[in-house]
Image (cartoon, rainbow, N blue to C red):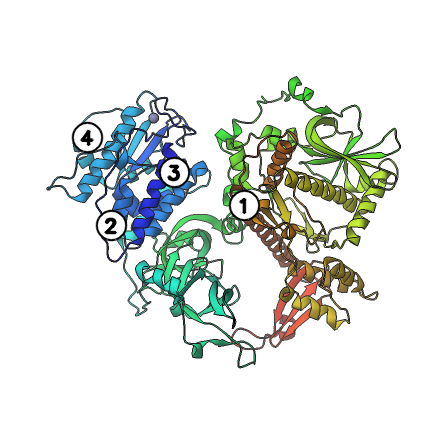
Amino acid sequence: MSGVLHHQSLLKVFHVKAKKTGNIVRVTREVYTRDDIYCQSRSCKLCNHTNPTLINNGTLVHYLVPTCEVILKYLEIFEVNVLKNVVFCETLFEYIHDNVKHSNKMTGSIKAIIADKNNRKSILYSNEHSNRTLITPRTESETIEMRNERAILKTADWYASHLKESKIIICLLAIDEEQCKRLNELKDQSLENLKIMTLKEYLANKEYYKQDASRIDLEQLYENVTITKEHETVDDNEFGYQDYLTLDVIEPGLNSGKYYKGVLRVNQYNSRNAHIKTTMKQNNGIIEEDVSVRVLVEGSADRNRAVHGDMVVIELKPKSEWKKIGSDESRTEPVGRVVAVLERNWREYVACLEESKNNTGDYLLAIPIDSRIPKIRIKTKQKNVLENMRLIVRISDWEKKSKYPSGYYVRTLGPIGDLDTETEGLLVENQLFTSTLPFSDLALSELPPVSSGAEFKIPQAEIQKRRDIRKTHLVCSIDPIGCEDIDDALSVKKLSNGNIEVGVHIADVSYYIKYDGYLDLEARRRSTTVYLIDRRLDMIPTLLSADLCSIRQGQDRLCVSVFWEFNKEGEVVDTWYGRTILNSKYALHYEQADELLKKDIGALQQLGTLIQKKRLKDGALELNDLEAVSFKLDNAKNPVKIETKDDLLIHHTVAEWMILANAYVAKKIYDSFPVAACLRRHPYPMKDKFQQVIKVAGSRGFEIDLESGNSLSNSLDRAEDPEDKYVNLLIRSLTTRAMSEAEYFSTGTLPVDDFVHYGLALQFYTHFTSPIRRYADIVVHRLLLWAINNEPNPFSTSKLDEMSKYMNNVNRASKLAQMESSEWFKANYFREHKDTIEDAIIFNIKSNAIYIFIPTFRIKGIIYFTTKEGEFIIPETEQK
Ligand SMILES: [Zn+2]
């Protein structure tokens, strides 16, 4: 058994113990100590560990060993992902369990830090179970704290002597001068590489700790946390929340159906209301079955300090208090109140300070940008500096006597309204901020060695392994103007038998990125290139994305290709997959290609159209990105023009070939790895989401038919008003919003019938054609190569499932960020162009507002007639 496995099983033991609050029965258990609990240092040659976590970055390599007191008070500083190489002693867990009221939140945080190996490089050391760090039992005159100090000193001491040869410094972090003094007196040997210092000293010592690229000033954070914790006073107001129930009460209640659990979701437009989705047992007359139910939680008292995203336990209120749905008296929605929080899901929030008239109080309120998050009380001495600034704040606690949660401010993003500040803000809010940080030295060290000026030469041995189409095939790429990361190209060739061979060639990114290497892990974490209006956050380093992998004109490039042979009827008679080397003859942009289509590469278009027709006949939907607009920016990045995108024939032709390649590769990897292939599905639309589309189309006399993809597609085609071209645009735009989201999944998790891609009308689909900007495509490339080489697939169903879910989340976040960035630029544009007059379509009317769509700018919005207080709003022009 490896040391790593051992750590996990220990963690489990602690988890189970933590649940036993209430009547704690002390169980004396035999402690087995072992010799094989390794140090996990990359520099160590004595231990028999595989893939150790602690790294050797920088010139002054050092590991941190914090005492219990440091973690108890300053865990926040370790949470922000700046400090690396932290050795958390097992001793901490027991201590936290006995000294912290809701200890599982704290131990959960530490476990999360340890689990995030790739970024944090931190470990749990099972010092209480290792023969190397065992200490003598507690004496009668010794307090638990003193015994723990001894245990942690012993661990730090062992690390220092164990790693003496490698010259690694061990920083034992103490809470204050006194603890330093005690530890210094206690240590029984003098090791040069063991440094005992306070956390504060460590953070101030620029030799060890340098402010990192994320610009989080830990010294400042230290001050903020200190102020918050040392002046933990509660408002005098009489606000009082209910106590939370303990786990020994909740667990049986959850089983018996007295309580229900679910993730609390706050309504974005009305933050007074929140709900959870949970499952309840319901008797349908014959059997009892699980039904998914939505439970409403109204007002802050019933929400009882739960924050949007927390996993909560609720109790249902009596039926007389349930909420009526519409005018029908018999239809009601259950209402509940929060009785406990199982898991806090607090993150970093972008906020600004509330403008307060009387600033006499000790606390200031920070208002998060996300309307679902409550105001946060922070304590700071820098009020004047922070006003009119965007801040990042965290919640540290929510006392039951306090109306608002208390927290601290982590750092300043910059002045409100500034482009860079707001962009960084929207990235933090969407949890994409880490994608802005530079690639780590370790990741960059895995890139091919290219000294400045010298070109990377593809090794001769590699060329020999591949199908060489440099001289035999006419290859070209077709992309938007200015595209630097060209990841796909096409070829077409007339064969001697009269058939036509078409090839789709995709950059062989996985050749340059070693499976599970540092670069791979970093690309996996980023998961996608994020495109904002004025910037791009790359998934892989520029050397690969814009150079070695980009299929540039006239350069030898490595690719993974799919070839099809078509007969005269346009049917596929043969397929080939594999690694190739090619040299692109033309890197065209769309406009050029549109011209050329009629001549040289006409066959591509004819065949492409044929395949598309067949797909459309099978029920594929034509839903382009109708809301996308492009901006023209001046040198200061001010938007000077907003344009809708042109739809050229060539777009469709290129897209059609990419869809075909994706579909073929999907089938291929599924056939080879039926339970662990990464595919992409697009579920059938949910009818209730289509109510608005049906209503809007109905108002013009059109019927929307959801029966099948085919019928929906046809009914969208019919919803065409020859007098008014925007009717169809609006209906398609609303349809896009109503559709389910497409998602990645692991084939072992679903029955084959559910694999369907509804929008494209394909049974098997995946992403293979953009490995430079999507991690899923890198995964699919590897799967394809393992499949054609008959190599084993190292992915299990569950590992791929986990990875797919992660990629889905990051994709969603990156789309949101892109939309928000576009909104910001639109708003900025209209600040300068106030007199713009454009036509708008009203697509919904409510008692106090109309919903409009402005086709020229692809803007949907709400115009209110009254304020929240019910007063009529009079447009400015009429006030004059
Ligand atoms: Zn070692």
As drawn, 761 above or below 85: below
First-in-chain label (4 vs 1):
4
In the depicted view, which residue is nearer to us: 501 or 728? 501
Residue at mark 2: 98
Residue pictured at 68% horizontal, 21% vertical = 463
Q: CA distance from mark 2 to mark 4?
A: 26 Å
Task: Give the mark toward the camera: 1 or 2.
Answer: 1
Specify the quadrant of the image occupied by residue 784: top right
| Label 1: few (<14), some (14–19) or many (≥20) C-alpha neighbours in 10 Å | many
Q: Say above or below: 92 vs 316.
A: above
- Counting residues from the start of the chain, the first of labels 1 and 3 encountered is 3
Instruction: Indicate the secondary structure of the residue bearing disc 2.
Output: helix
Determine the CA span between mark 1 and mark 3.
Answer: 30 Å
Q: Please name the residue that numbered disc 4 is placed on.
A: 187
Residue that carries the numbered disc 3 in the rendered image: 83
Q: Which residue is mark 1?
A: 801
- Nearer the observer, disc 2 or disc 4? 2
For residue 680, above or below residue 600: below
Please tell me which residue is depicted at 84% across the width and 37% down the height of the picture.
601
Query: Image quadrant of residue 494?
Result: top right
Under mark 3, the amino acid is Leu
Could you say where residue 611 lies in the image, as x and y percent from the top left?
A: 80, 45
Checking the image for residue 820, the label placed there is none
Upstream in sequence: badge 2 or badge 4? 2
- Are the residues flagged by discs 3 and 4 in contact, CB closer than 8 Å? no
Q: Where, quadrant-wise, is the N terminus in this rendering?
A: top left
Q: Looking at the figure, which quarter contains the C terminus?
A: bottom right
- Give the distance between the C-alpha atoms of the residues marked 3 and 4, in whole angstroms: 25 Å
Neighbourhood count class around disc 2 (C-alpha, 10 Å): few under 14, some 14–19, many 20 upward: few
Instruction: Confirm or deny contact between disc 2 and disc 4 (CB under 8 A).
Output: no
Q: Earlier in the sequence, mark 3 or mark 4?
A: 3
Regarding residue 360, the answer to whether it shows in the image is no
